[in-house]
Image (cartoon, grey):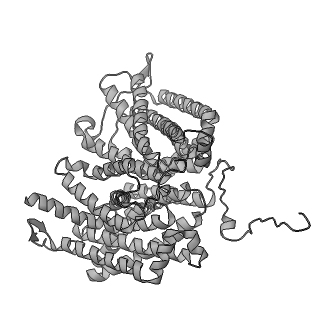
Amino acid sequence: MSIVAQLIANGIIAGSIYALVALGYTMVYGILKFINFAHGEVYMLGAYFAYVLAKVYHVPIVAAFIISMILCAIVGVIIERVAYRPLRKSTRLAPLITAIALSIFLQSLALLVWGSEIRTFRTGEISKGHNILGAIVTDTQLMIIATTIVLMLLLWLFIKKTKLGKAMRATADNLEVAKLIGINTDRVIATVFAIGSALAAAGGILIGIEQNLEPTMGVTIGIKAFTATVVGGIGNIWGAVVGALLIGLVENIGIWFIPSGYKDAIAFVILVIMLIFKPSGIFGSGREEDIRAQGE
Amino acid sequence: MYDYLLHIAVLCGIYVVLSISLNLAVGFTGLFNIGHAAFYGIGAYTSALLTLAGVPWWIALIASAIMAGLFGFMVGVPCLRLRGDYLAIATLGFGEIIRAVMKNWTGLTRGPLGLPGIPKPSLFGVQFASIDMYLLLVVVVAIITVVIVNRLVKSPFGRVLKSIREDEIAAKSLGKNVVKYKLQALTLSAMFAGVAGSLYAHYITFIDPSTFTLMETVLMLCMVVLGGAGSIIGSVVGAIILVILPEPLRFISLPSSAAAALRQMIYSVSLILMMIFRPQGIFGETSTTKKFDLRKLLGMKKPKIKLRTKKNA
């Protein structure tokens, strides 16, 4: 019984991190209809920024957390400005290629600056952990879940209550019409990249505190978070959160049945199954023309 | 030194096959495949395992093409009905899965230890053991690939592929089964990658999962984009340039991890710059429907609008 509880707890913790990253994918896709492949690398950068701030400059961890999120928001805006905006009117292939190239670039930059060795925030002893319904959950893990919930509430308030959030929803609904009625869509897009990147950074820092840091940490999380957005219905913000929790749970319960070396493969199998049977996702809006190939 | 130059030439030949095969999918059909290294790896492992089990080399070569093609077909079936970026993410995931299998299925692949002692090929009693002979073999295969793909893309089949790249709806409205053509293009592309994998495995005589990474696909993509998507001569030139270009880095004393990172940064920056300033590549076709014009984007050139005035009406 306690094993099941433990696996579910692990699934929720992993799912929270996936959700933070998935939100960036789904928000960008909702507006620009393209996959920001460099998003996983922003997650990695977030973790490293916080690591450097906390370990080298001895900034308190909470401050390091916030500064790193802000830095990543800036990185996200720069990425959009330099690599994506000049290509917005070109073929669909071009931004995909720059996105991949950018992701490789950021990865090798991190490799060059911080080296390939695995790093960790951890300093002292590992805290003991609480027994919640038979599952052992550490303080850090509780912090992950709490932070995720807080950040999502903030995002929800931003989208629902602010003017910029309203503009965001309008732009996601129809970019051209939003432009017509006077919304500065370039600013909205930049905001989306900033928010998405900050959230991804938060995910990266949390996983950095919980586990380790390495330059390639963004690749698999990228695939998983993207799978989460497809499962939930791409472009749908709450779908991404539900999809992320689902992926986290399936993955962690799955390693009970199959060798753990294949854990990363589970997300991909789910992705393929979704693509075959319901490409619009659980909360798909029925706007299948966004997903189907042009000729279909 | 002579052997070193021949070694570079062999690598050029293998990458020519790889970049042309990737170009068939990416450049000619517009299928964004970023799991090409997985097909390459499948070809390499198939050929290596079969010859290690005593199967003649030429049968293993054909088998590696068929095996890679089969996987290409399997990836294509669920993804080609969807928009391009889905194929991209699915092939990315597929590449990672294949690597996970190579690493974890130790009973078959020996995992990260790799497969050593892959025999050099021989055909009709001719041994391709020396590097000169191997170069001959690679060049012959590369030329065959160029000829076949060239014939393919100039045939009616190739014209359909290009029409799919340019406008799927138009191709469909002309009664073309778009999904079927895309599937055929991806399968063929994967088959040639499998052949290249076999060539690589029997040349190096040792393979392990670390060769067939996403970075390898990005390198092939660089070759295609540099030479020009949809250009055969472009793929050949792009492959040769990008194999030779980083070689001088070898003679600068850098720690190997830094050198690798530096090389990747050079590749990725050149890709981004290429996409922004010359997306059609060196030999790219200029007649794509959506032409890119930086000056127009920056507002330096006014768009041409013909006004119908009374004078010229």
Front residue of A69 and A161: A161
Q: Which image quadrant for residue B70?
A: top left
Name the residue located 45 percent from the left edge and 79 percent from the top edge. A165
Q: Which image quadrant for residue A240?
A: bottom left
Name the residue located 17 percent from the left edge and 61 percent from the top edge. A8
In the image, residue B190 sits, relative to residue A65, either above or below, namely above
For the C terminus of chain B, the image quarter is bottom right
Q: Is residue B230 left or right of residue B135?
A: right
How many numbered discs, if any?
Answer: 0
Q: Residue furthest right?
A: B311
Q: Position of residue A267 (x, y in %)?
A: 30, 53
Q: Position of residue A234 (x, y in %)?
A: 41, 61
Q: Residue furthest front?
A: A286
On the question of residue B221 being in view, the answer is: yes
In the image, residue A69 sits, relative to residue B186, either above or below, namely below
Name the residue located 8 percent from the left edge and 65 percent from the top edge. A134
Front residue of A120 and B241: A120
Q: Is residue A57 left or right of residue B43?
A: left
Name the residue located 61 percent from the left edge and 75 percent from the top edge. A180
Q: Position of residue A89 (x, y in %)?
A: 61, 63
Q: Position of residue A166 (x, y in %)?
A: 47, 79
On the question of residue B204 being in view, the answer is: no
Front residue of A271 and A45: A271
Front residue of A261 and B123: A261
Q: Is residue B15 left or right of residue A281?
A: right
